[in-house]
Amino acid sequence: MTNFNTLGPIMGVVGVLYLVPSFVAVVRQRPNMHTIFGVNLLLGWTVIGWIAALLWALAGREHDRGRPSLWSTSGRKPCPSCGHSLHKNARRCRYCGYTITAKNT
């Protein structure tokens, strides 16, 4: 007779190891983390698919959500309402719709 008391923990460990590329993508805040999860979920059962998803999750830089990139900082200013980077002569934020007046610049 098979011992089913050890099957549950073993399947849990295998499940966590199977999703390691997705966890790495989320922790590293990859901008394409949903695609990496899809590749991991659909092709992870092949060893090549799992390795490809892991390398994709580890490659490149993290997604910078709060910091503007260096090339976009010249001639730009933050929106007083939402903080997105706007052109220095912008009158309205295209992200939140905030109207910029001379008083709040």
Image: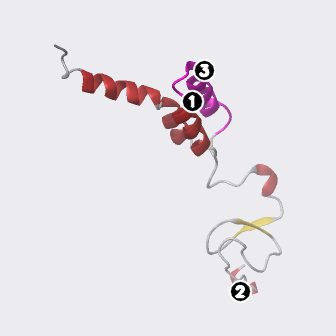
Q: Quadrant of the N terminus?
A: top left
| Mark 2 residue crowding within 10 angstroms, few (<14) / some (14–19) / many (20+) | few
- Left or right: 57, with 77 as reference point: left
Residue 55, numbered circle: none
Residue placed at 54% from the left, 39% from the top?
A: 37
Number of residue marks = 3
Q: Which residue is mark 3?
A: 48
Left or right: residue 16 compared with residue 24: left
Which residue lies under the disc numbered 2?
103
User: Residue 3 vs residue 91: left or right?
Assistant: left
Image coordinates for residue 39, horizontal then vertical, percent: 59, 35
| Spot occupied by residue 86 in the image (x, y as percentages of width and height) | 75, 68
Q: Nearer the viewer, residue 30 or 74?
A: 30
Q: Nearer the viewer, mark 2 or mark 3?
A: 3
Above or below, 62 relative to 50: below
Q: Amino acid at mark 1?
A: Leu
Residue drawn where x is 63% and y is 46% of the image: 31
Mark 1 or 2, nearer chain start: 1
Question: Which residues are the magenta region?
Answer: 44-61
Q: Label the magenta part by its dominant secondary structure.
A: helix
Furthest toward the top, the residue is 1
Q: Could you tell me how far apart the alpha carbons at marks 1 and 3 are, in whole angstroms?
A: 8 Å
Quadrant location of residue 104? Answer: bottom right
Q: Amino acid at mark 3?
A: Ile
Q: Which mark is residue 43?
A: 1
At label 2, which amino acid type do we have? Lys
Are the residues at dot 1 and dot 3 in contact (C-beta closer than 8 Å)? yes
Work out whether residue 81 or residue 29 is closer to the camera in this orientation and state it.
29
